[in-house]
Image (cartoon, coloured by chain):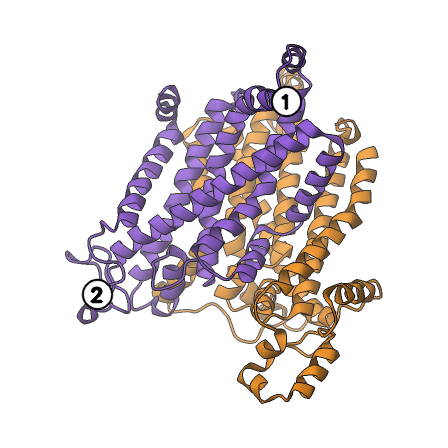
Amino acid sequence: MRILRAIFGHGSGRIGGIIVGLYLMLAILGLLGLTPHNPITQYRIDRLHAPNGAYWMGTDLFGRDVASRLMAGIGQSFTVAFFSVAFATLAGTVLGLAAAWLGRRWDGVVMRIMDVLLAFPAILLALLIVTVAGPGTWTSVIAIGIVYTPIFTRVVRGPALSLKAREFVDAARTFGSSSFYIVTRHLLLNLVAPLTVQVTLALAWALLTEAGLSFLGLGTQPPAASLGLMLSDSRNLMETAPWLMIFPGLTIMISILGFNLLGDALRDILDPKMRRAPA
Amino acid sequence: MNYLMRRLATFPLVLLGVSILVFVAIRMVPGDSITAMLGTEAGLLTPAQRDSLAAYFGIDQPWFVQYWRWIGGILHGNFGISVTYGRPVLDVILERFPLTLELALLSMIIALAVGMPAGIYAATHSEKPSDLGVRVVAMVGQSTPSFVLGLLIIYTLSAGFGVLPAMGEFAPLWQDPLRNLSQLILPAITLGFAFAASVTRIARSAMLDVLSDDYVRTARSKGASARSVIWRHALPNALIPVVTLSGIEFGYLLGGAVIVEQIYALPGLGRMVLDAILQRDYALVQGSVLFIAFNFMIVNLLVDLAYVGLDPRIRLGEQ
């Protein structure tokens, strides 16, 4: 509750929070199929209709309702973003904690593997993984998850190393606390703040990468709606039906903006060191 | 220096890891490259013809033999033969690389030329409406995917002014500089926009941090002019995070901008890699990914060097 109040007391946090909240609602409605029209039904008589009362954002080349497809697409994008970031957070936290706690050889091996993953530009690594596993929604989840795992590993390992050297960890050891208890209770709980910020910003990145993959035809496969694919399909109809490009474009952009704003606000709120110094 | 030595020592190790990863990954892609290369005609091959083609491209051997040959070849400057182009992989890569390099440089120039002044301006006008304006634009810029911006630019040009971006045969810089620039300027703006936004944000916050430091306050109280405080005292230190960010971003761009190249129909490295992956052109994927990762790591290493150079306090070895 206190964190929610802090977010809404923060200028960009308020806007980001509202955007993310709205998108979450749209995503849930889209996933439940509670859209104005069926997103994959083709109303052939109404092909390429400009936005009007019946089709708020117009229809596409096959006479499908753009607004409904956007809602379904938001549902898809958010599913991929949430699961991939959850994957990366979990994997990164476990690896980062293991590297920091076990130290020496473990640390070396884990961090070198992360170095190898970080040596690829993100989209290239995602492309490679998607091609190996075949395009699809869940492949995107795995691909984006693997791409962001090294970042979470680094975010966790650094602070975990310095926490490990602190007196309270020594004290806990002296009292006979088990390693598992110390790692989960003393290290992990102290890492919640930096992880929260990273998760929010990673969600923005995941939405971007998902849209990019599906723009290239390597994400969610048709006829299911996906924002990147809608945008990609709009290219040939840009002049006759600009709404096919403008609405998905804005939808992607605003969703990323929302998470970026929220992430910035959380960083200000949770990390006192990052607070802006007054000029 | 300790740190840099260690970085240099792990460099070949990481590169080896990259090579193994990409080698194994591309072989896990379903389907074989001969069928991908010949399409339906592959069905017309006799088993003997297929075998001799496989032997020609060296894909008839077990994977470790293939890997060993590949690595051995690379150490002699031989990256293998591309199945799709029928030419040496290195030639194909080097043909595409100038465009990618030029695009990355142009984007970085745009980003720094716009981002640095905007960031410094916002920091020196902190909490005023103009600062807020810069921050809003930068936030929106950072949240705009390049493919959304690219399509918006193309749409605005064609619907508003009836012109289309210069496409068609790509003209290298040294053959037709004007045509070359007219082909690359829009993609560079598309890529440079979000880049400029990041530079603005980081330059602003670095500048704000520095401006509140004691030594800047001392300079001010000694009566140094506002201009001298900003340019001589604050800016050099505020540059450090900007250099880091630009370096990393530049490194990414050297890997090719897959989507922007696709939108503007540019024959860059990114599209080549995508096509090679889709075509299962093993040799080309392996060679180009290794090439890209190598460049990326070199740029990151240079960024670290610049870091040490810019801030003598940083003793990376002690961290």
Picture quadrant where residue A261 is located? top left
Q: Which of these two is toward me, A9 or B293?
A: B293
Determine the secondary structure under disc 2: loop
The relative height of residue B76 versus residue A182 in the rendered view (above or below) is below
The quarter of the picture where the N terminus of chain B appears is: top right
- Residue A262 as seen in the image, left or right of residue B119: left
Numbered marks: total: 2
State the image coordinates of residue A18 (x, y, percent, origin top left): 32, 34
> Which residue appears at 70% of the width and 45% of the height?
B300
Residue at the (48%, 25%) spot, across then down = A268
Q: In the rendered image, is residue A188 in sight?
A: yes
Display colour for chain B: orange
In this orientation, which residue lies closer to the viewer: A165 or B90? A165
Residue B235 in view, yes or no: no
B244 lies left or right of A270: right
Q: Which residue is mark 2?
A: A49
Residue at image coords 49%, 55%: A139
Task: Name the residue tied to disc 1.
Answer: A179
